[in-house]
Amino acid sequence: MKSVYEPLTWLVGGEAGYGITTMGQMFARACARGGLNVFGYVEYPSLIRGGHNTAMIRTAVDTVHAHSDKIDIMLALNKETIDLHVNEMAEGGVIIYDGEGIPLDAAKYPNLKLVSVPMARITKELNVDRVMRNTVALGASFAIMGLGFAPVENVLNTTFERKGPEVVAHNVNVAKTGFDYVMKDIKEPFKKTVAIVPNASKRMVISGNEAIALGALKAGVKFMAAYPMTPATAIMLMIAKYGVKHNIVMKHSEDEIAAVNMAIGAAHMGVRSMTATAGGGFSLMVEALGMAGITETPLVVVEGMRPGPSTGLPTWTDQADLRFLMHASQGEFPRVVFLPGDVTESFEMTLKAFNTAEKYQMLCMILTDKYLGESVQSVEPFTQEYKVDRGLLMTMDEAAALKPGKYKRFEFTESGVSKRTRPGFPNTIFAVSTDEHKEDGDLDESSENRTKMVDKRAKKLMTLKKEYLSDVEMCELHGPTNADLTLVGWGSTKGPILEAVDVANSNGLKVNFLQIKIALPFPTEAVTKFLGAAKKITLVENNSEAQMGGVIRQYTGIEIMDKLLRYDGRPFNPAEILVKINSILKA
Amino acid sequence: MSKPLKILEKLTDLDTGSKCNWCPGCGDFGILVALKQALFELKLDPEETMIVSGIGCGSQAPHLIKVYGFHSLHGRALPVATGMKIANHKMNVIAIGGDGDGYGIGMAHLVHSSRRNFNITYIVQNNQVYGLTKGQTSPTSDHGFKTKSTPEGVIEMAARPLGIALASGATFLARGYAGDIMHLKKMIMEGIQHKGFSLIDVLQPCVTFNKVNTYQWYQERIRKLENDPKYDPTNRAMAFEKAEEWNDKINIGVYYKEDRPTYEDELPMLAQRPLVEQSIDTIDISDAMNFYM
């Protein structure tokens, strides 16, 4: 396949506990320091030591949207890595390995270039810990790519500068030894497709989870309660890390039930509040979501999907919780389900979620997954232009001006949204119940009140759609307007689909991609319009039941017959989507 | 940014006028009166007081006292109260609920709240039976107690909530009795005044569904710890011993009291002002972003 992208794919593999993830991060950052773009994807089993881990980094001058099914350079820290991934090697690819520890018969790898770097011996000779093989290998990798040593030195500098100039010099020396070892034998760099971009603007190398946490920081989250669960744990850890600096309390609670109830309690008092979890923890939170619904408490909940049911595949990815989030908890109440597709959208939708939650006094959920949450991407620094909008939250002065006994927390209004007070304010004492209540919050089971309250809450979603989250904004058509084939997807499949579509179009095909960015309120009008104009439609989803397909049919009446579904716990790679496109348009 | 303190002139200023659904003779009435009197006598500003309940007969309490109220989920009064306390630690936060709520479905939260020691008072209306669902066994039902869900009698041992909370690190433990309002009021006042997590277990006859643990049954057994000159509520071992006593002799009074910094005291984020009073209008995340460059 000819590609408009010529990204170079590097993979490091080894046993869990070898520092594979850190190695991947260092490599990705070094590439970014060289002005290149990156996408990084990690695979690991559900254990701490001993299993097989990999980190794949793809790098290119242009944006890289996804991981790849082909490896150009493999850095094998053990033999298992070679055995497991040799079939994924691109023609003419390079395997960097330590020949003194892993004897390889070159004849068995006819189309590959084997580069042995005595990593263990070098660490011994330099009298450093064996784990610094990784640093030797980092230098060796940059030599093979022909990218020079400067980006490596640069990244080591900033990584270790806090530990003093000696530690920096020491690390640089180890990496340089690896670099020089390879350089002395190399006549030509491995590939010419990537080259350092001088004077490129500074970019962040950041994961979807980290982007959500940054979004929460920027949006002014003051309280988070959570319980660790892969793949969402990074969010709570990052909020905790910035706790003192930004005056945020992150409470690691006894379970997810406590987490969401604490978050609701804090939100009710008037701070921006959130929780984050994976499907299992979300299951425990379900009852309290309805409490946020009926008490009209603004709450942001992040769910990072991993394959279920039950414990499932804890460290892998899929998109099978869409319907769950859309319907979780008994009864009917309005909610928002954001579907970010990449790192930048993860940040932006988090900002939006906090404003939406407060403006409409509503549960706002952000649905991400392992592939998006834990993969890193190089992106421009996020915009800091953000206006906190707290909707109808009163100030102390507004409350003080009220007549005592007149305040109604759940007053029926045109928009469905009522004035919100902060407990502690004067003149606004009220008690709210998770039982159905009347305008002042007191219990009321009457038929008339019940109907009005259900309508009041539902109205908020209509208001929100009208004035804040328009169809057009929450649904995006990528690629040419007139296409022979429209792919439909949501969430983390965005990257692989975008790349496949770009490649297909550069090959003379006409394909576009409809990205659905919100599940509730569903962008019915826009989806109907786009799909109504489409010639052929294929649905792409990381689940077995085509859940978004069902949702689309429910809201638009359009049934997408052709589907590309993957539910083995692995994300789609662009190549398999391209195969699908070709099979439809070249048939 | 603080408002002038509001002090109530008369006890009835705490009345809401809401309709109460309790059976005539229910112990919840005594608890409600004692709680209102305690709030009034302590001169707590009702606008700076929050009562959070779970679900159960007694959990209607927030609607019956004119302070801020939150009638939450079955078993979840404590985590909701915890979030509230962290968000605004200037608020007086009182949680209330029944024995099914606090010692059954919500037991884990009692253990962890005791460990944490937030300045929250937790009042448990303990009638040893499920009332709102019409008479099933509760975690504090005695062995052999026959209910609709245990027609052959309860097989488990009854939970000893004061012992559990004590073992978990609670810093104030008391037991009151719904039939002795003056004493109960005192327990609640001491609990609220205590700086840290206080649990007030209240023995509360259920006149409709518990025909064993009646007012009379309690009157015959209740002893006041304060009448025992040898009892020292700062002695943890003694408290454990008393917390085990049941059946023939049931102790009311302050079981245990300990000074320990509260959770909120140890949160540097709250040192200047409550989270709710911190501005979020312009937050700069350049530093955090720099980390990723």
Image (cartoon, rainbow, N blue to C red):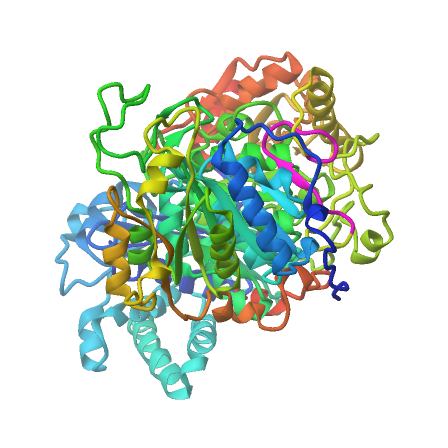
Q: Nearer the viewer, residue A32 or A23?
A: A23
As drawn, A348 above or below A535: below
Magenta: main secondary structure equals loop
Quadrant position of residue B136: top left
Asked if residue A437 lies in the magenta stretch, the reply is yes
Taking the spot 28% from the left edge, 60% from the top edge, the residue there is B239
**Residue A336 showing in the rendered view:** no
In the rendered view, does A221 fall on the left or right side of A143?
right
The quarter in which the C terminus of chain B is drawn is: bottom right
Taking the spot 34% from the left edge, 58% from the top edge, the residue there is B225
In the rendered view, does A275 fall on the left or right side of A415?
left
Q: Nearer the viewer, residue A114 or A450?
A: A450
Image position, residue A327 (x, y; %): 54, 25
As drawn, A190 above or below B217: below
Quadrant position of residue A78: bottom left
Find the magenta span and give its range. Answer: A427-441
Taking the spot 80% from the left edge, 36% from the top edge, the residue there is A467
The quarter in which the N terminus of chain B is drawn is: bottom right
Q: Nearer the viewer, residue A302 or A130?
A: A302
Image position, residue A354 (x, y; %): 65, 47
Asked if residue B145 lies in the magenta stretch, the reply is no
Taking the spot 43% from the left edge, 21% from the top edge, the residue there is B134
Image position, residue B222 (x, y; %): 34, 47
Instruction: Give the mark count.
Output: 0
Image position, residue A528 (x, y; %): 70, 19
